[in-house]
Amino acid sequence: MDIPTGVHILLEREGKVLLQRRAGTGFFDGLFSLPGGHVEEGESLLETARREAREELDIDLALGALTLFGAVHRRSDTHRVDFFVRAGAWQGEPRIAEPGKCDRLVWAAPSALPVETVPYIRAALGQSRGPWILEFGW
């Protein structure tokens, strides 16, 4: 069985995290989530984070400034595993680089996330700084 693997990127600034509102994807549209996406063939988790940050936010992440800090094993439309990566630094100012998949960016305190946040993302951001593993939806 192939299990879809995702990577979510945590960008932090002044005690807030960057969220993007999904739009036009058919999956969690209208809800806020962390930037990220699926691991592609032959790609590491950290390489996925770099590629997704470039594609979605038009920023560059240095591999050396990325750390894995959590994982969610979840039941959603299918059985999935998502890894969470903290970006210690980046170059560029995050912007909506894929307007067909995202219609808004917001910086929010983890303790004051928008009501319309993807449930497993809300649960993950409520965990300790890591490392941690969370089972969700079982």
Image (cartoon, rainbow, N blue to C red):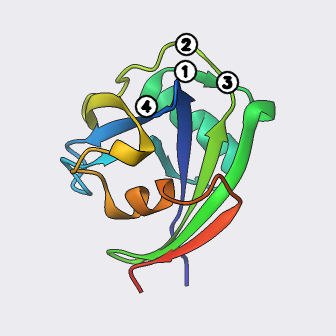
Viewer-side residue, 10 vs 45: 10
Q: CA distance from mark 1 to mark 4?
A: 8 Å
Task: Say what secondary structure mark 4 lies in.
Answer: helix
Q: Earlier in the sequence, mark 2 or mark 4?
A: 4
Q: Secondary structure at mark 3?
A: loop
In the drawing, what numbered circle is on residue 89? 3
Mark 3: which amino acid? Answer: Ala
Label 1 sits on a secondary structure element that is loop
User: In the shown orientation, is residue 23 left or right of residue 133?
Assistant: left
Which residue corresponds to the image point at 72% horizontal and 38% vertical from the top-left? Answer: 66
Of residue 106 and residue 15, the one placed in the foreground of this image is 15
Residue 57 in picture, x, y percent from top left: 45, 26
Tell me which numbered mark, 3 or 1, is placed earlier along the sequence: 1
Using residue 22 as the reference point, say whether residue 73 is left or right of it: right
What amino acid is labelled 2 in the image? Gly
Q: Which three-letter amino acid code belongs to the residue tagged 1?
A: Ile
75 versus 90 height, above or below? below
Disc 4 target residue: 56
Residue 80's disc number: none
Q: Position of residue 1 (x, y in %)?
A: 55, 85
Spot the residue most to the front. 111
Disc 1 packing (10 Å; few <14; some 14–19; many ≥20): some
Left or right? Give the position of 99 relative to 93.
left
Circles 2 and 4: CB atoms closer than 8 Å: no
* Residue at the disc numbered 1: 59
Residue located beneath label 2 in the image = 92
Q: In terms of sequence position, does the residue under pointer 4 or pointer 3 come before the other?
A: 4
Q: Position of residue 55 (x, y in %)?
A: 47, 30
Label 2 CA crowd tier, 10 Å (few <14, some 14–19, many 20+): few
